[in-house]
Amino acid sequence: MSLETEFERVSLPLENPFTISRGTQTEAENVIVKITDEAGMTGVGGAAPSAHYGETAATVEAVLPELLSVVEAVGDPHGLHEIESRMGDAVGDNPAARAAVSIAVHDLAAKRLGVPLHRLWGLDPSTAPATSYTIGLDETERVREKAADAVEAGYSVLKIKLGTDRDRELVDAVRDAAPDARLRVDANEAWTPREAVDKSEMLAERDVAFVEQPVPAEDPEGLRFVYERSALPIAADESCVTLSDVPAIADRCDIANLKLMKTGGLLEARRMIATARAHGLEVMCGCMIESNASIAAAAQLAPLLDYADLDGSLLLAEDPYDGIGMEGGELRLGEQEWAGTGARPSAGQ
């Protein structure tokens, strides 16, 4: 069997500027990968690299020829384990680039069998949790407006970005606009351990469910300090990048947060989920700001998760790909009409 491969870089404008404690972005640079078999069937994947983890769109483009040569050499989209293993040998780092290829190969393999990817894995779509919708940092009144808009759009789970001297004010604004919503907060490493413990008490009083990455990943003992004293459960994101991180965080958090752009592929993501379960952790899958070319694949993992944070494509002003239905945050895998991940060109593309 012969496979043809290609990729292209796309700049995706955001509907609104998106701010976290580390900075603001107004567009997302993604790289789209396509793998086509002899019958003309095409698998699609996407890379959403993060400079925080040492990747850019340029580095993704630089290594993709080598990664795609692995796919062409194997020549069989069903050789998933061999492809991911050989990609890891060829390019040890660059997880977003490897994830894009892994997604495209999985998409093509499931399409060739005529089933959605979650069906290929034997997962029950009815057990998928709702995704949260993220409210980025902004002026307090604008945060209130964003929360009200999200509730009006049907989202019942909101994630609030924190890490300012207005954290209490921001949470109160969201709670005022969304009194019945389930709230989560993400500090993106912005707090000190003592500050995180103090803020956890304030957040617990406002019925927040859990706190994501309160302290820097470079301070594992600080994370343990918070975990042992926090009034709320703790999720590890920046502290949980690769499979080997899972045992290391098992006594420092309650929830492991994986992202395809950190794991380097769907097979590795499933290994991380299983490892987190073996260590008694709950599991969440998050995302970067991504096209549905990759979000649709992450959504296929949802039945294996306790929590989903897969709203990256919802923050875009336009996306070259449609994906899984997420109206009101419900991941509508059971209504998926397309084989593969569910990613497909948007109308007009």
Image (cartoon, helix red, strand yellow):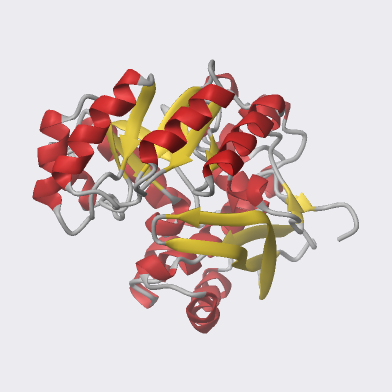
Is residue 309 placed above or below 200 in the rendered structure? below
Q: Which quadrant does the N terminus fall into? A: bottom right
Residue appearing at x 54%, y 75% in the figure: 57
Specify whether 153 is left or right of 220: right
Q: Quadrant of residue 202?
A: top left
In front: 154, or 141?
A: 141
In this image, 60 relative to 217: left or right?
right
Residue at 58% x, 35% y is 144
Please say whether residue 250 is visible from this viewpoint: yes
The spot of residue 345 in percent (x, y) is 80, 55
- Which quadrant, please, contains the C terminus? bottom right
Residue at 61% x, 59% y is 45
Q: Position of residue 203 (x, y in %)?
A: 33, 27
Most extreme residue toward the right, as rendered?
348
Q: Residue furthest top?
A: 180
Q: Position of residue 292 (x, y in %)?
A: 66, 51
Q: Nearer the viewer, residue 200 or 35?
A: 200
Instruction: Provide residue 169's location: percent of width, then percent of height.
Output: 42, 35
Residue 314, located in which quarter of the rendered image?
top right
